[in-house]
Image (cartoon, coloured by chain):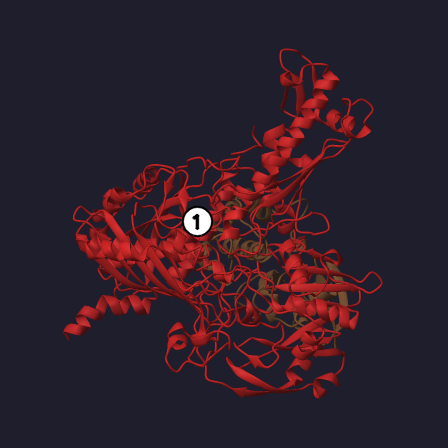
Chain colours: A brown, B red
Amino acid sequence: MSTVSMTVNGKVVASVVEDRTLLVDFIREHLRLTGTHVGCDTSQCGACVVHVNGKAMKSCTMLAAAADGADVTTIEGVANGDLHPMQKAFNDNHGLQCGFCTPGMIMSGIDMVNRYKAEGKTLDEAAIRAELEGNICRCTGYHNIVKSIQQAAGEM
Amino acid sequence: MSEGIGAPVKRKEDKRFLTGSGRYTDDIQMENQAYAAFVRSPHAHAMVKGIDKSAAEAMPGVLAVLDGKQLTGDGIGNIICGWAITSKDGSPMNMGAWSALATDKTRYVGDAVVAVIAETKAQAREAAEAVVVDYDELPVAATIGAAVAGDAPQIHDNAPGNVIYDWEIGEKDPTDAALAGAAHVTEMDLTNNRLSPNAMEPRAAITKYDAAEDHYTLYTTSQNPHVARLVLSAFYQVAPEHKLRVIAPDVGGGFGSKIYIYPEEIVCLWAAMKTKRSIKWTADRTEAFLTDAHGRDHVTNAKMGFDADGNIVGFKVSTKANFGAYMSLFSSAVPTYLYATLLSGTYNIPNIYCEVLALYTNTVPIDAYRGAGRPEASYLVERMMETAARELGRDPADLRRQNFVREFPHQTPVIMNYDSGDFEGNLNQAMEAADWNGFDARKAESAARGKLRGIGMACYIEACGIAPSAAVGSLGAGVGLWESAEVRVNPVGSIEILTGSHSHGQGHETTFAQVVADRFGVPLDSIQIVHGDTDKVQFGMGTYGSRSGPVGMSAIAKALDKVEIKVKKIGAHLLEEPEENIVIEDGQVKATGTNKALGWHEIGLAAYTAHNLPADMEPGLKEGAFYDPLNFTFPMGCFICEVEIDPDTGKTEILKFVASDDFGVIINPMIVEGQVHGGIAQGVGQALLEEVVYNEDGQQLSASYMDYTMPRADDVPNYDVLHHNTKCTTNPLGIKGCGEAGAIGSPPAVINAITNAIGNNDLSMPATPSKVWALIHSARMAAE
């Protein structure tokens, strides 16, 4: 068993967990924050993406213990007020259907916009499609997800 | 009316999904919850000689280790297929027994044998590893070819030669005669590749048993919770129908795979009763590949005959359809009434004959996957038309144009009666948007860069809005395929719509509300859609086959008709005006020719206070309706795909994809376009990337996202989605349905574009770079 302590969505949380506990299970089962999803178990689909110390990470492939002391943001914590510009853009552009991949898409979208801004690079359509390599959606055909991220990139 | 029919209203349901507040089955935590894990057969075909549970039972946290003999001993029934198909010789189909936990024999890798119930998920999984099953391996038939071979193993004792049925439709002799007399016959052998639906939310179930009430609750990832309750109670005898509540909360995509009732739901309900604990089971992705019903998997020979002028004179089709190891709930209908009845395509074909040999193999059961039979038909018809045009030296658009159905209603030789359409209008719209006439210049430009450019089209038609109950009943369906709706106007005027349709991404909470807002002019925010709970909604047949628009919304329209009549009676009474002068608009009940009006909420209040209602009128304002369709609906369209191929690598890039669809009346164009986008991506996936692969031992080699190629954002293009709609004439709203069209029309459009680019028709799906490269270089290699 390990004691893990981290900041999740601005709140300090601590818990004693089995050593093998994945970060996603810590978030979903221990903290009952169920917006972060598990879609594939093999780091392919990106439904589990959260931000760890400001970087997008697949929480299904990281131990909770590895996030000890980290600052974690989940989909429940991204909005400062009503909706984050990325969340609003997905609503504006019909960037979601069943909603299961959506939290991961939004977390990846925010991360890519932040990175491109920090590096002074342009996040065009081709770049968004390449950056989304780690996120699978079965409903939307990606068309409106790309539009959503493009809109948010202009507003963030 | 900005929120009514035709308005691109943003979705009401989005906020909970965007903020992580969606409530999917695995998000739910019950009191006293334990977990199930399944021991699955590692062999594709084996006798179960013995099960040693002792080590597992002794492990920490283990509550029960349950096997098939206990399950059948408790009277739990076998899983059934609900659509009876009769063979050519009049014999019934050969349905083999499928126990939710295998008793004597396993028939595919993934077949459940034992269920372990434990305090935690990890304990259940670890104990499952400790169960020792003694198997005696049997020879395996993993493919259609292996199942029909002379020395094929017998998978079910009651299905000699592994044949489930040998079915036919149409007239054989006239079709043979038409082909014999044809000026030209195009013949092709085509395979429709096996796919896994891959809804992003894996299947899950949570069950609860209340011993005091002898009552069961099942939360499940279902597209049709009422059908699940019916089948679980009537056929599997897990619980009586009135003692079982089935809830399908937010469901993360379905695409057909969540229609069926699987072994895991049955076992978890039964285990809840046995252990007096709530039981949760959630599939991991490999479990999904090993147990979710797959789709497609046809091998077909087809012959299409033309007269000297290019008119189609006959079409003969012989298909072998893989069913996997057991018959899933709707499996038998897919390669028959959902496939062969669409073989006329968008064309006048006077003679059609199709025979279908349905076969067991030692693979995952196959059932309906987005399109279900219609993608297989569309792929066949549209590849045949394209190849015929090339063989005849005809322009592919002109050959199609010449053979289009132009008068409606049109009776095909294979049951369907098309009610409406303007096939040439969609063709013209798509060709213009794709700049078809400018293709030669673009091809030359690609050639100058050493690339191969190709363009291809497909003019699909499909049948949605399944289906008139008496008609499908006469064809073997075990259920009626109507839909139900209830409209409750509350005393304050807000409206609840209870529907038997189920939304798992389709946006019903928005579009269904738009139908109501359109009728009464009340704000969308005052309308709530209730679905997915058998305790709330009386009954429903669920969502599949693009039926929620044409059937589900028609039921709502019918219930709204009844509400409208009562509202007008109340309005006439209160306003003291003749009923025929009462109109409902902008949320008000008005008397025409006067300035008298009542607010919508005043009607609701009057109905429930009942202080001043017309004589003999019952209080309250609630109406229900069952809507049984008069006919299938027939969405159709023209898709055009333009590709560029690198001859050095064989890699295909889609440069442009145009879809011109006829969906009838559209409620919300934003949502409809989203459905088309997603459908096209799945069709592009089938055409270029996806295939479930088995080796000859029946091991699935593609059972994770590291092995099965899901379309990703950089595999697909932007889509130009256009509409050229004609109103459906057989339902009250004029809707045809849009959920599957993208997946139905796109595979042949993509493949026709690639074969156009490489000048070789002998291409199968998925058109991987290695296959395409080999075809490009085959002529050169043959010469060397």
Instruction: Please state the total of marks drawn on the protein image.
Output: 1
Who is closer to the viewer here, B699 or B420?
B420
Q: What is the crowding at mark 1: few (fewer than 14 residues within 10 Å), some, or many (at least 20)?
A: many
Tell whether B229 sits left or right of B371. right
Image quarter of residue B202: bottom right
Regarding residue A19, the answer to whether it shows in the image is no
Q: Residue furthest right?
A: B212
Callout 1: SS: helix
Q: Position of residue B592 (x, y in %)?
A: 63, 14
Q: Amino acid at mark 1?
A: Ala
Q: Position of residue B725 (x, y in %)?
A: 42, 37
Q: Residue furthest left?
A: B783
Regarding residue B391, the answer to whether it shows in the image is yes
Q: Chain of mark 1?
A: B
- Determine whether B486 is above or below B460 in the image: above
Q: Residue at x 57, y 46 (%)?
A: B482
- Determine whether A138 is above or below B489 in the image: below
Who is closer to the viewer here, A14 or B638?
B638
- Determine whether B183 is above or below B771 in the image: above
- Determine whether B626 is above or below B204 in the image: above
Which image quarter is the N terminus of chain B in? Answer: top right
Q: Position of residue B565 (x, y in %)?
A: 66, 27
Q: Residue at x 57, y 40 (%)?
A: B553
Q: Position of residue B616 (x, y in %)?
A: 77, 25
Which image quarter is the C terminus of chain B in? Answer: bottom left
Tell whether B585 sits left or right of B151. right
- Residue designated by label 1: B741
Image quarter of residue B273: bottom right
